[in-house]
Image: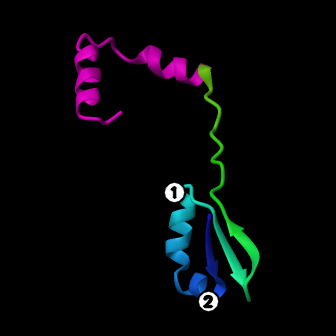
Amino acid sequence: MDDVNLADAKAHLSELVARAEAGEAIRISRRGKPVVQLTPLAQSRKPIDLKTLRLVTDTLPPSADAPDIVRTMRDEERY
């Protein structure tokens, strides 16, 4: 955990927020005493509606080249 004084935090707030988003915890102090801590929020995910997903996927035509598409995605690191 990194300690930053309040004056530096004011001057570099955008950078500190970016670091916190990346997973780093940052403690901000005033007159040498810790007063707040920046930490990343846990992102909640929406649950998948399986009925809607089935409706969409059932209407798609089957693809014979799906394995090739997956291999290409994997090889290009786009997964």
Q: Which circle's residue, 1 or 2, is located before the other in the chain? A: 2
Rendered residue at 55%/59% (across/down): 21
Q: Quadrant of residue 67?
A: top left
Q: Residue 78's spot in the image, x, y percent?
A: 31, 36
Magenta segment main secondary structure = helix
Highlighted magenta segment, given as a residue range: 51-79
Q: Name the secondary structure under disc 1.
A: loop
- Residue linked to disc 2: 7
Residue placed most toward the observer, 21 or 62:
21
Residue at left 74%, top 89%?
Answer: 31
Q: Quadrant of the C terminus?
A: top left
User: Which color scheme does this rendered protein use?
Assistant: rainbow
Q: How far across and how far down the image is residue 51, in percent?
A: 61, 19
Which amino acid type corresponds to the residue marked 1 in the rendered image? Ala
Residue at 23 percent of width and 29 percent of height: 75
> On the image, numbered disc 1 is attached to which residue?
22
Q: Position of residue 15 (x, y in %)?
A: 49, 73
Q: Is residue 77 left or right of residue 20?
A: left
Foreground residue, 33 or 43?
Answer: 33
Instruction: Judge whether 59 appears above or below 3 on screen.
Output: above
Quarter of image, res 76:
top left
